[in-house]
Amino acid sequence: MIDLFPTLTELCGLETPSAIEGKSLAGLLENPEAPWERPAYTVWSEDGKHYTGVSVRTERWHFAEFFGKGQGKMLLDPLTDPHELRNLASEPRHAETVAAFSNMARTYAADRIPPGK
């Protein structure tokens, strides 16, 4: 949803304010095959003050990490498991991928809601 406003401003020929976090998807609307390196993030919060989970989706992987109560990690492969039923996070061969996504999720969460807010 954060990409909707910058997409609409670009399509309307308006300037997008620099403080906007999202990026325009107009290029993808014009050419759906264009490369897109930006992951999609989804966050949730049980108390409205702290993130209790972050999901990171790329073309190749879907990763989610839960913080606090019920903590854990999920690494899903939508290409080979389109219903996302098999969690690959504990498989040693995916340890580097899990670590990289965990870092992305934690950085994303830390940059948006300060601890203790």
Image (cartoon, helix red, strand yellow):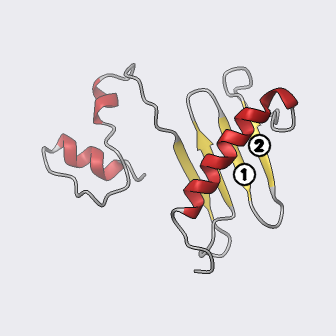
Point out the image quarter for the C terminus: bottom right
SS for callout 1: strand
Vertical order, 69 against 73 (above or below): below
Q: CA distance from mark 2 to mark 1?
A: 6 Å
View extreme (bottom): residue: 117
Residue 58 placement, left or right of 65: left
Quarter of the rendering containing residue 97: top right
Cβ atoms at labels 2 and 1 below 8 Å apart? yes
Q: Residue at x 14, y 49 (%)?
A: 14
Q: Give 65 or 104, whichever is nearer the viewer.
A: 104
Residue 22 placement, left or right of 52: left
Residue on which the image places disc 2:
74
Q: Residue at x 56, y 34 (%)?
A: 58
Q: Hey, what amino acid is under mark 2?
A: Met
Label 2 or label 1, whichever comes before in sequence order: 1
* Residue 65, numbered label: 1
Classed neighbour count for the residue bearing mark 1: other residues with Cα under 10 Å, few (<14), some (14–19), many (≥20): many
